[in-house]
């Protein structure tokens, strides 16, 4: 494949939350196969600005696959065709010269569109605010071996904690469920001693907030795991459900 390509983009444009949107077609020439997908959108926007047209709005920040801001649906797949790769880390060598790439925002009632490809993901913030933290005093940091934690628990907690909150799980789920996100935030704290004192309150508060935000229920399609850029397992959802039931039983609820 040549390292230079012509790429056709079909991009969702929407002026605001209350506006009707539509796809608009663009062509970007001289695309280098080593460019990231977001760099192609940068080139497109530079062209639109020179023409006096409004650029395509899209979220981005670190562009290193860490912050989770960059999420878009690319050819029907959250973050695009390469597994365990955020949109900002997707490179154009995944495509061919002359390809048409369809670009859409996350689509979920709980993620209202702000403009073009930008959606409001503050529902995730409110789920975290409901209990995704440790507020008890844990004192100074102990020696590394003072509190022994089984290696399996440590590994699982680390995997769950790798969630970057991008929302791909919601976008991919046919029910627009936020279960993988919520479960990963609950799971990594539930598995570690620091999170134990508040684990019962935490799981109920966060799951209840998830439901208040209007996310759908999990029905085990596992699309969330398939598109997660960090490959977080749906085993976290099973853990969340067990924690939730245990909490209700222990409280008599």
Image (cartoon, grey):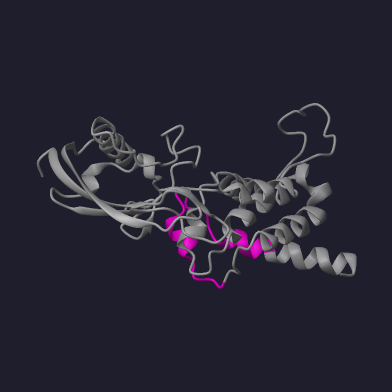
Q: Please indicate, yes or no, whether residue 151 appears anywhere in the rendered image.
A: no
Coordinates of residue 124 in the picture (x, y in percent):
62, 49
- Give the quadrant of the N terminus: top left
Name the foreground residue: 37 vs 203. Answer: 37
Is residue 234 rendered magenta in the image?
A: yes
Query: Residue 222, position in %: x, y?
Result: 49, 66
**Which range of residues does the magenta coloring cover?**
219-240
Give me the residue at 55% from left, 47% from top.
165
Q: Is residue 38 left or right of residue 228?
A: left
In the drawing, does residue 72 fall left or right of residue 159? left
The quarter of the image holding the C terminus is: bottom right
Residue 77: image quadrant is bottom left
Q: Is residue 87 visible?
A: yes
Residue 186: percent from left, percent from top: 68, 52
Q: Is residue 224 above or below residue 220?
A: above
100 drawn magenta: no
Position of residue 83 in the picture relative to residue 186 (left or right):
left
Instruction: From the top left corner, tell me how far across and down residue 196 is, in percent.
Output: 79, 48
- Above or below, 188 against 233 in this view is above
- 166 above or below 144? below
In the rendered structure, the answer to whether residue 55 lies left or right of residue 173 reads left
Q: Residue at x 61, y 58 (%)?
A: 236
């Amino acid at each position: 494949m040549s390292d230079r390509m012509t790429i056709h983009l079909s991009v969702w444009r929407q002026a605001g939350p209350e506006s009707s949107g539509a796809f608009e077609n663009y062509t970007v020439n001289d695309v280098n196969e080593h460019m990231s997908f977001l760099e192609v959108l940068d080139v497109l926007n530079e062209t639109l600005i020179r023409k006096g047209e409004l650029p395509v709005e899209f979220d981005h920040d670190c562009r290193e696959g860490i912050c989770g801001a960059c999420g878009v649906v690319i050819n029907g797949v959250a973050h695009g065709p390469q597994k365990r790769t955020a949109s900002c880390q997707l490179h154009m060598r995944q495509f061919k010269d002359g390809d048409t790439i369809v670009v859409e925002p996350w689509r979920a009632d709980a993620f209202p569109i702000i403009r073009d490809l930008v959606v409001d993901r503050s529902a995730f913030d409110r789920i975290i605010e409901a209990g995704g933290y440790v507020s008890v005093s844990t004192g100074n940091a102990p020696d590394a071996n003072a509190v022994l934690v089984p290696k399996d628990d440590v590994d699982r907690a680390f995997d769950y904690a790798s969630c970057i909150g991008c929302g791909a799980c919601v976008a991919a789920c046919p029910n627009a469920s936020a279960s993988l996100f919520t479960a990963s935030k609950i799971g990594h704290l539930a598995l570690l001693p620091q999170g134990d004192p508040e684990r019962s309150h935490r799981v109920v508060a966060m799951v209840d907030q998830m439901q208040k935000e209007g996310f759908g229920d999990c029905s085990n399609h596992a699309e969330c795991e398939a598109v997660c850029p960090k490959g977080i397992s749906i085993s976290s959802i099973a853990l969340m459900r067990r924690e939730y039931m245990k909490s209700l039983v222990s409280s008599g609820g």
